């Protein structure tokens, strides 16, 4: 008999790493043992089309307007209708699913944290209390990095050893070095084959701090030959980035905004270096994808980035917001092609050894089976009923 999982997520708008991770998980899990329902709390989007409909049903609670609407009742109705064995909610925006599932007492409850709204532990007391309550009510609490696990343990007082960790994984059959794709994509974008190309892909939001990359570019030496920065994605920070360039004419022809792109593997293959200047991260899917694609990567030393990158071996780390340090690392990589090649090779090896999609899927399958088995007796005896 198959285990039915109700995945509760906030939105499916397109570029989010967590949302893409859910899609990859559904695609990868054994369909003879698991079936899926995806409940989107706020709004559907382009990523919805990526969910295989032969594997999962998709439902949406609809727009919430102000974003403050309490949706526990709507979630309870969906849980009753879907009759899942396991409800898996993700991040603060879906935490009401734990409350709804707990009141119904008809299924196992998993809640996982995939990131932070702020690096500061000083969340409002009400939010910390509700998160702690949800952790207590859940049969299993998960996070995507040890840094994130420790952050929420400190923030809520919930024991760290009761929070499991499953790192994100990348599909190495989709993301891998392809020399021919590099040539074709560069031709399409009008980039010379020997041009030094730095890029980033993802949501253009303040948390991603793409502005630090542009600030670093102002410090590139005049002795550099041809170089380009490619920025793929959209978001509220786009006008800020464009205004920064407007006042720096020397950068305008060097920086290209591509908007949201459909073929991320092709885009990554045309780059030489991938930069992730985020203020905080759980485990970045885009970072893993860049490493699997054979790129030299530079990322801020925050969150799960330090769990993904071994500094100086499989990539480079730099302090948050330190555009000078980023410029120094980029300058070194520009000058030393052999270092780029060595870091890229080791990045591929590290992803295959520690962050494969197959490993992630296997770990989630084991977790779901364990939770379902552990809570089965409790549910049968009615101990989960209020």
Image (cartoon, rainbow, N blue to C red):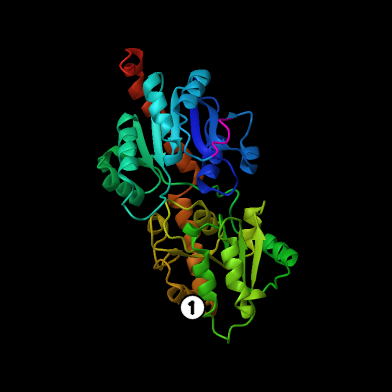
* Residue 327 belongs to magenta span: no
Which region is colored magenta? 60-65
Nearest the eye: 26 or 248: 248
Q: Which image quadrant for residue 218?
A: bottom right
Viewed as shown, does residue 74 lie left or right of 108?
right
Q: Residue furthest top?
A: 381
| Position above or below: 22 against 270 | above
Report the magenta stretch's main SS: loop
Q: Position of residue 168 (x, y in %)?
A: 46, 46
Residue neighbourhood size for the residue with mark 1, other residues' Cα within 10 Å, grouped as few (<14), some (14–19), many (≥20): few
Q: Report whether residue 73 is seen.
A: yes
Q: Secondary structure at mark 1?
A: helix
| Front one among 217 and 223 | 217
Q: Is residue 145 above or below residue 331?
A: above
Residue 178 visible in image? no
Q: Residue at x 58, y 53 (%)?
A: 175
């Amino acid at each position: 008999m198959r285990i039915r999982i109700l995945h509760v997520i906030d939105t499916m708008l397109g570029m989010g790493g967590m949302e893409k991770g859910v899609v990859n998980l559904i695609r990868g899990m054994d369909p003879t043992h698991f079936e899926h329902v995806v409940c989107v709390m706020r709004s559907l989007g382009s990523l919805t089309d990526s969910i295989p409909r032969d594997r999962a049903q998709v439902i949406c609670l609809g727009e919430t307007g102000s974003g403050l609407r309490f949706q526990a009742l709507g979630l309870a109705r969906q849980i009753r209708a879907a009759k899942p064995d396991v409800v898996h909610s993700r991040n603060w925006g879906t935490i009401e699913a734990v409350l709804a599932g707990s009141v119904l007492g008809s299924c196992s409850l998993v809640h996982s944290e995939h990131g932070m709204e702020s690096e500061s532990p000083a969340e409002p007391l009400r939010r910390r209390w509700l998160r702690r309550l949800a952790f207590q009510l859940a049969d299993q609490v998960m996070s995507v990095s040890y840094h994130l696990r420790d952050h929420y343990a400190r923030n809520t007082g919930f024991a760290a050893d009761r929070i499991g960790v499953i790192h994100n994984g990348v599909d190495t059959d989709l993301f891998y070095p392809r020399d021919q794709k590099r040539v074709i994509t560069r031709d399409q974008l009008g980039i010379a084959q020997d041009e030094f190309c730095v890029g980033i892909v993802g949501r253009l939001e303040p948390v991603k701090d793409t502005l630090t990359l542009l600030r670093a570019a102002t410090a590139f030496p005049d002795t550099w030959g041809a170089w380009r920065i490619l920025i793929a994605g959209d978001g509220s920070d786009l006008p800020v980035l464009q205004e920064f360039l407007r006042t720096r004419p020397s950068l305008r022809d060097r920086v290209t905004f591509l908007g949201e792109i459909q073929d991320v593997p092709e885009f990554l293959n045309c780059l030489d270096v991938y930069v992730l200047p985020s203020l905080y991260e759980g485990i970045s899917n885009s970072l893993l994808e860049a490493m699997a694609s054979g790129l030299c990567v530079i990322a801020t030393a925050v969150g799960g980035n330090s769990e993904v990158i071994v500094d100086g071996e499989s990539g480079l780390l730099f302090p948050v917001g330190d555009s000078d340090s980023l410029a120094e690392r980029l300058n070194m990589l520009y000058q030393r092609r052999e270092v780029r090649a060595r870091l890229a090779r080791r990045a591929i090896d590290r992803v295959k050894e520690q962050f494969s999609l197959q490993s992630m899927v296997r770990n989630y399958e084991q977790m779901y089976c364990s939770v379902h088995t552990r809570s089965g007796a409790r549910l049968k005896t009615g101990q989960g009923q209020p």
